[in-house]
Amino acid sequence: MPGRNCWSRPSGERHPSGNQTILSPRCSNLELIASASAGALLRMEIEEAAKVLSAIPKVARPLELLTELGLGYLELGQPSSTLSGGEAQRLKLVAELGTGASGPTLYVLDEPTTGLHREDVTRLIKVLNRFVERGDTVVVVEHQPDVILAADWVIDLGPEGGAEGGRIVAEGTPEQIAKSGTHTGRALADELKRGRPSTRASVAHADAGT
């Protein structure tokens, strides 16, 4: 099954007797793909599938990106109806990154960090910055402090939640909001005191609101 390119890989070695060929990892993965049923592949978790399909970069790279975004536990064949809102938004982000940009685009995300560990939030911010760096605008409705600190401009709604909120109580850079005295401002001030590093993109187009 493996194509002839497999046998010419430097990592593949021929047995001294000439009767046996030791396959490179790439060839072994292709053999595994060929022997697996469609059902078995669809039941694989994304993180595992990224490794198995590493010999096919166009397929593996999006799976690796999904793993970086904390979605490695999802199965390839998992019904979209079972995904949370945050999971679905991250899937769409990867799909968008895989398409050729047709021009500056506006992306609006509603609490995409839901269910993420802090390390995964950092990975998500890096992905959002990739959109910003290619000239897109990203608007995020979010309460997670790391995301707010990564924004170029924050619109703080309040002063409270529910019926007591919905009004603009402050706007500006995260550092300006931290001095505003609002609930969000005090939370950001505490984060800045802890020395949280900036994760802003080098091109200023990303907005985040709380």
Image: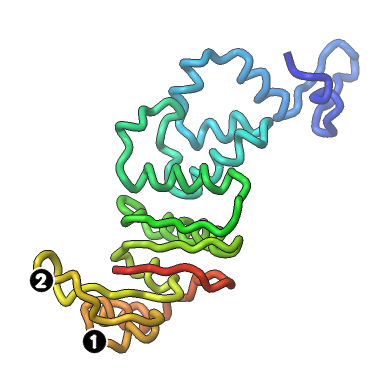
Query: Left of 6 or right of it: where is 61?
Result: left
**Amino acid at pointer 1:** Gly
Q: SS at mark 1?
A: loop
Numbered mark located on residue 181 in the image: 1
Point out the image quarter for the C terminus: bottom left
Measured as percent of width and height from the top left, residue 85 is found at 31, 45
Rendered residue at 60%/51% (across/down): 101
Comparing 100 with 176, the one in front is 100
Q: Is residue 165 above or below residue 122?
A: below
Measured as percent of width and height from the top left, residue 150 is found at 44, 71
Query: Left of 102 or right of it: where is 179?
Result: left
The answer to whether the residues at label 1 and label 2 have Cβ atoms under 8 Å apart is no
**Amino acid at pointer 2:** Glu
Rendered residue at 75%/18% (across/down): 2
The label nearer to you, 1 versus 2, is 2
Numbered mark located on residue 164 in the image: 2
**Quarter holding residue 146:** bottom left
Measured as percent of width and height from the top left, residue 7 is found at 83, 23
Rendered residue at 36%/32% (across/down): 80
Label 2 crowding class (10 Å Cα cut-off): few <14, some 14-19, many 20+? few
Comparing 30 with 150, the one in front is 150
Query: Left of 57 or right of it: where is 192?
Result: left
Q: Is residue 6 above or below residue 94?
A: above
Rendered residue at 34%/77% (across/down): 191
